[in-house]
């Protein structure tokens, strides 16, 4: 078999899954319910965030929160302060790709 296969969850339970971490990219799958999210942090690479379902509420640097619906891809530059949350009752599902892969 030439390809490698990676599996991630398909449910509604909170998840932060490191699906693929190699020297090229970091590929993460995240699921958040209302009131859940990530601790505020700075991006450690270029971040490409795809909203698979639900609505993403995100505050970047000193901006107010903006909301993005399913089908949206955000490109967030390196060293940007990020506050990722789900403010709605719908389950939020994200695919996050960091490229290039962060160094250590």
Image: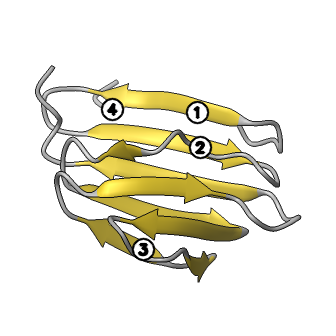
Q: CA distance from mark 4 to mark 2?
A: 23 Å
Label 1 near label 3: C-beta < 8 Å? no
Q: In the figure, residue 44 lies in which quadrant? A: top left
Measured along the vertical axis of the image, is residue 59 above or below residue 9? below
Residue annotated with mark 1 = 16
Question: From the viewer's perspective, is 25 left or right of 81?
Answer: left
Residue annotated with mark 4 = 3
Label 1 near label 2: C-beta < 8 Å? yes
Label 3 near label 2: C-beta < 8 Å? no
Disc 1 secondary structure class: strand
Q: CA distance from mark 3 to mark 4?
A: 26 Å
Measuring 63% from the left and 46% from the top, which residue is drawn there? 37
Residue annotated with mark 3 = 73
Mark 2 is surrounded, within 10 Å at the Cα level, by few (under 14), some (14 to 19) or many (20 or more) other residues, namely: many
Measuring 13% from the left and 28% from the top, which residue is drawn there? 23
Q: Earlier in the sequence, mark 2 or mark 1?
A: 1
């Amino acid at each position: 078999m030439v390809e490698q296969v990676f599996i991630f969850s398909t449910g509604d339970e909170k998840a932060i899954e490191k699906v693929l971490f190699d020297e090229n990219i970091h590929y993460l799958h995240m699921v958040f319910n209302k009131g859940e999210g990530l601790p505020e942090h700075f991006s450690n690479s270029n971040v490409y965030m795809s909203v698979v379902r639900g609505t993403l509420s995100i505050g970047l640097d000193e901006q107010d929160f903006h909301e993005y619906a399913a089908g949206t891809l955000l490109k967030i530059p390196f060293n940007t302060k990020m506050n990722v949350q789900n403010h709605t009752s719908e389950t939020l599902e994200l695919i996050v790709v960091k490229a290039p892969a962060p160094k250590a």
